[in-house]
Image (tube, rainbow, N blue to C red):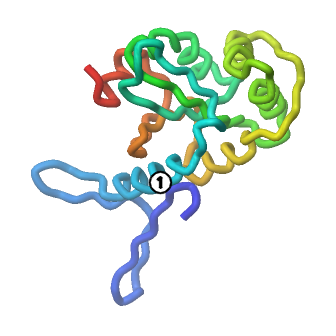
Amino acid sequence: LQGGTFLYGSADARFLFAGDLYQLGTSLVNVTDSERATKRAALLAKVPVKDALVFTPKNGVRKSIYVFTDVDCTYCRKLHSEIAAINDLGIEVRYLAYPRSGINSESYNRIVSAWCADNPQEALTTLKAGGNVPVRTCTNPVADEYRLGQELGISGTPAILTEDGQLLPGYMPPKQLALAIGLN
């Protein structure tokens, strides 16, 4: 279902439950989350890179991540304040807009202004540092990215996703983030 909820039913259609299905064995495996990751990866692959605000490492990309972000989120701001350290680890950050207050909120208008700025990366950095940028409007992907986040079950920001669809909710320091996405 939209938002990442899975329903499971019995073959005779007598029983139905919503939730995560775990496989027991030598380790506990969340089968449902594996399915969610597959769906997330497929949907993220459809997002044109030109629609993201991308911060690319100068010394080459080892891994790319998607980050659903809000300009008024404290932990989004903290993550962004460490963007140089994240890039230094070879991690490309592809920001997708997720104004938590919703479409047509003040946060929405502020993030649209960043996406529509002459230099969107600089405008986003200014907003995340607590500054202001000129109000701008243009054709932009902000509403579509917000709806995508809802479809993926994003409930808070920052929401970090790997290219294979793994969700890493919340802020992580750069070195912890690198380890979480498989970089040493």
Q: Is residue 109 above or below residue 122?
A: below
Q: Residue at x 41, y 86 (%)?
A: 13
Residue 184 on image: x %, y %: 25, 19
Q: Residue at x 79, y 20 (%)?
A: 118
Q: Is residue 148 left or right of residue 139?
A: left
Q: Is residue 125 above or below residue 114?
A: above
In the foreground, 9 or 78? 78
Q: Is residue 46 left or right of residue 144?
A: left
- Element at label 1: helix
Outermost bottom residue: 12
Crowd rating for badge 1 (residues with CA inside 10 Å; few <14, some 14–19, many 20+): some
Which residue is label 1 attached to? 42
In the foreground, 99 or 93? 93
Residue 5 on image: x %, y %: 50, 60
Q: Residue at x 66, y 44 (%)?
A: 145
In the foreground, 118 or 114? 118
Residue 14 on image: x %, y %: 40, 86
Q: Is residue 4 left or right of residue 146?
A: left
Amino acid of disc 1: Ala
Which picture quadrant has residue 163? Answer: top left
Q: Quadrant of the N terminus?
A: bottom right
Q: Residue at x 35, y 19 (%)?
A: 176
Which picture quadrant has residue 16? Answer: bottom left
Residue 137 on image: x %, y %: 87, 32
Q: Is residue 39 above or below residue 52?
A: below
Count the labels in the image: 1
Which picture quadrant has residue 19? Answer: bottom left
